[in-house]
Amino acid sequence: MILLFTVWCIDYIDRSVIGVALPLIGKDLGLEKGQLGLVISVFFLAYAAAQLPGGMLADKFGAMRIAVIGLIAWSIFTGLTALATSFVTLIAIRILFGLAQGIFPGAAMKLLAERSLPDERMTANGWVNSSNAIGVVMAMIVAAILLPLVGWRGMFLVISIFGIVITFVFIKGMPAPMHDVPANDVAKGRTAALLRTPAMWWFALAFFGYDILIWGWNAWTATYLQEEFALSPSASALLALPPGLAAALMIVLAGRYSDRIGGNPIRLIVPGMTIAGLLVISLPFMPNVFTYVAATTLIVGLASSAYIGSFSIPIKQLDPKVTGIAAGMILLGGMIAGVLSPTIVGFLAQNSGWTAAWMFLGLGAVVSVIAAYAAPRNAEAFRARVPSSLLYHAPATDVVPGKDLAK
């Protein structure tokens, strides 16, 4: 859990710092808001394209091998971002960066599924995936420190080194699976069967709605603060800390709550996303920085319960041998949102103003709530709608918490 948490933090630092640096990059390379939004979106386009192949590769060749390849590759492309000299080169580097990061999530979910029991899996996922919010917080801190010292180019070079260092720690420290799960032991046709399962796509749609709101806000909140309240890049970065910390706390709590209630997506998604949706459309009317930060802290924190809700039942109930592709399916929904949301928000902000841009993010909450009601509400409903060959069936030799693992 500690190793996965750390690598996920590096993942989110590498992808998130560009949001703070966008105004500086735009000024340096002569780019408009629409172009800058496209820089964010092409990353997600490549990231989305890699989700299903990444999950399949993890199931076929082993999660650890694919995770390490992704970590090394994205660290290299993070460093290469510093060498961009034009809109075209920046786009090309961000596409390669997105492909490299895109093969990691399915492998990471599979690594954890192989090393945890179903009854504790979402608690473990909550702790590990709180790194997503902590990574964004750390990205803001890193950006606030490095941008004034070394500029945006130097910042990307420095954080790429972090990834290379962590890779060696990750390889050396990751423990073996709890059970022997051969890398290529995926029955023929199980991947296709999973892709044909409608219940899985409802969870992907729930994650799509969540990321419409989160990535649209994340990509543009620093620019909004700099334009509307005349803040410096460093100040705008630091003001993203409260929302990030709120998200981390909510993900941990939601993970533990999910294991207690059996992962019911309605109870995990609907309350938080409903309130977050109402608050996000009120952002253009916040009179000052304090009210804006307070509102976004509530928005990001409450919405984060939907992150856990999107994975809660599938990751607990599916055979670990197919969790790579399962995670890839759900993450694909979020990454499609990541492609669309930053570009649409940038376009709306430039052509219709920030009010229209923030109103658009409210649609994400609506989509997520609808998907939560359509998805299976408990383990029994999920298992009834998914082929038995894809489900986890506890073996007689399963490890029991509290027992001697050596035996």
Image (spheres, rainbow, N blue to C red):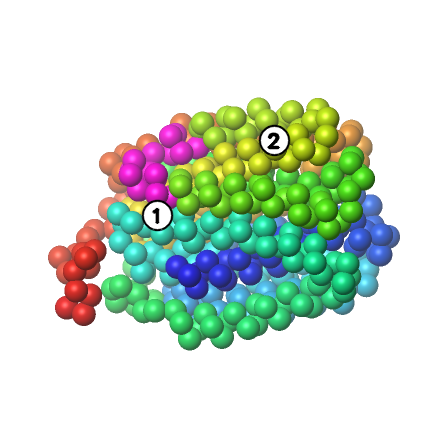
What is the crowding at mark 2: few (fewer than 14 residues within 10 Å), some, or many (at least 20)? some
Q: Quick one: SS at disc 1?
A: helix
Q: Residue at x 29, y 46 (%)?
A: 317
Query: The residue under label 2 is which amino acid type?
Result: Ala
Residue on which disc 2 sits: 295
Q: Is residue 285 left or right of 376 when viewed as pictured?
A: right
Q: Amino acid at mark 1?
A: Thr
Q: Residue at x 66, y 43 (%)?
A: 239
Residue 51 position in % (x across, y down): 50, 54
Mark 1 crowd level (few <14, some 14–19, many ≥20, 10 Å Cα): many
Magenta residues, start to end: 255-269
In the rendered image, residue 85, in percent from the top left (x then y), is placed at 81, 63
Residue 197 is left or right of residue 11, and the answer is left
22 magenta-colored = no
Nearer the observer, 394 or 276: 276
The residue wearing badge 1 is 123
